[in-house]
Amino acid sequence: MRKLPVALALIALLLVAAIAWVLSWPAFGGAPLEGERLARARANPQFRDGRFVNVVPQAQRQWSDTWTMLHEQFTGTQQRIPPAPLPVRALDVAALQAPPAPGLRAFWIGHASVYVELDGLRLLVDPVFSEYASPVEVGPRRFQPPPLRLDELPRIDAVLITHDHYDHLDMATVRQLAARGSSFYVPLGIGAHLDRWGVPAAQVHELEWGQERALRGVRIVATPSRHYSGRSLRDGNATLWSSWSVLGARQRFYVSGDTGWSDHFQEIGARHGPFDLAFIKVGAYGPGDSWRDIHMSAEDAVRAHVALRARRLFPVHWGTFNLAFHAWDEPIRRTVAAARAANVELVTPRLGEIVDAERPAGVDAWWEALR
């Protein structure tokens, strides 16, 4: 009988060792709360009891929400993956290599990833080119490829990261961009992940809300959001999350990142608006108030756009990964309805389709052909 406890103890030790080994993989990132980063975090007003917190607390998760999630996971009937590939607007890769013309233009790469040109700068927002939004090739797998390969993009001047979740911060993509000399603008703590992945410190700008950097006359400002962070079991809310306000000489754009609704939209609009383009997340919401507090609905996305004093709403965070319990096209359909009700100017480009802030654009309901 003595052999059984010994065997169980050995199994437990092996399990702990295996977990520790897996968590040591580079994809999980670095240790954000050490050294100078820890000192900065302790001085940050959003850092309490060893973790970053939201200005407006998230509602407590209810057991009914958990039950609904489990029920939908195994019995939900929503078409969460489109029945056919999404339409793509073919990009002139050679033309992209030419110096950007003056002005503001952008195209959607998929999910939250966007390519933007402003005042001669080339920027990427939350670029994810990998097949999986996961540290391993298991988990959320993209059902729609990007409209071009990462190596077909021109050299990117600035990469904006909103938070460290896998569908927004992709190790393989970061490493390729870093090797080509791109600079990274990230919320406090995420620099530890980039350190682990070999990104030179000179290419990393680690900001807190209200801090900014200038790049060839363009101001890149870290602004508030309402979300959470973490890449493993041991680093929950160890890094800050952020939206971004990017201000050029004549035009400016806003990036919401993942967020719930709160007064921060009015504050950002008053301080940094009006914006010519607002890239706002519209998908992966619900069920329950707790989830919507950090992943707002399509209707709240439109409300946020109005509060930001933005001109055109460019919806993102949908159409690439199956991450929530709703139909794949429900977010855009709800966004269109809410935008019409609020008289908001909406653009619904195909993947790879360039939106120019100076040219007329409108709603093209291309997703209806896939139903």
Image: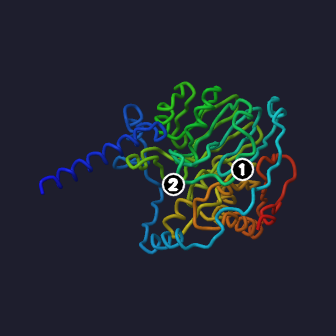
Kindly identify the amino acid type of the residue bearing the numbered disc 1. Answer: Pro
Name the side, left or right, on which 231 lies relative to 224: left
Q: Is residue 354 above or below residue 305?
A: above
Name the side, left or right, on which 352 lies relative to 36: right
Residue 238: give x, y in percent of width and height: 42, 45
Residue 24: give x, y in percent of width and height: 40, 38
Q: Nearer the viewer, residue 159 or 83?
A: 83
Q: Nearer the viewer, residue 120 or 194?
A: 194
Kindly identify the amino acid type of the residue bearing the numbered disc 2. Answer: His
Callout 1 environment at 10 Å: few (<14), some (14 to 19), or many (20+)? many
Q: Nearer the viewer, residue 260 or 165?
A: 165
The disc, 2 or 1, on the residue closer to the chain's N-terminal end is 2
For image coordinates 79% across by 66% down, the residue present is 368
* Residue 314 found in image quarter: bottom right
Residue 116: give x, y in percent of width and height: 73, 41
Q: Is residue 195 above or below residue 242?
A: above
Q: Which mark is residue 298?
A: none
Secondary structure category for the residue under label 1: loop
* Residue 244 found in image quarter: top right
Which quarter of the figure is the C terminus placed in? bottom right
Which quarter of the figure is the N terminus placed in? bottom left
Residue 333: give x, y in percent of width and height: 73, 67
Which colour style is shown?
A: rainbow
Query: Closer to the camera: disc 2 or disc 1?
Result: 2
Callout 2 environment at 10 Å: few (<14), some (14 to 19), or many (20+)? many
Residue of label 1: 274
Name the side, left or right, on which 236 lies relative to 270: left
Q: Is residue 329 above or below residue 147?
A: below
For image coordinates 34% across by 49% down, the residue present is 49
Q: CA distance from mark 2 to mark 1?
A: 23 Å
Residue of label 2: 227
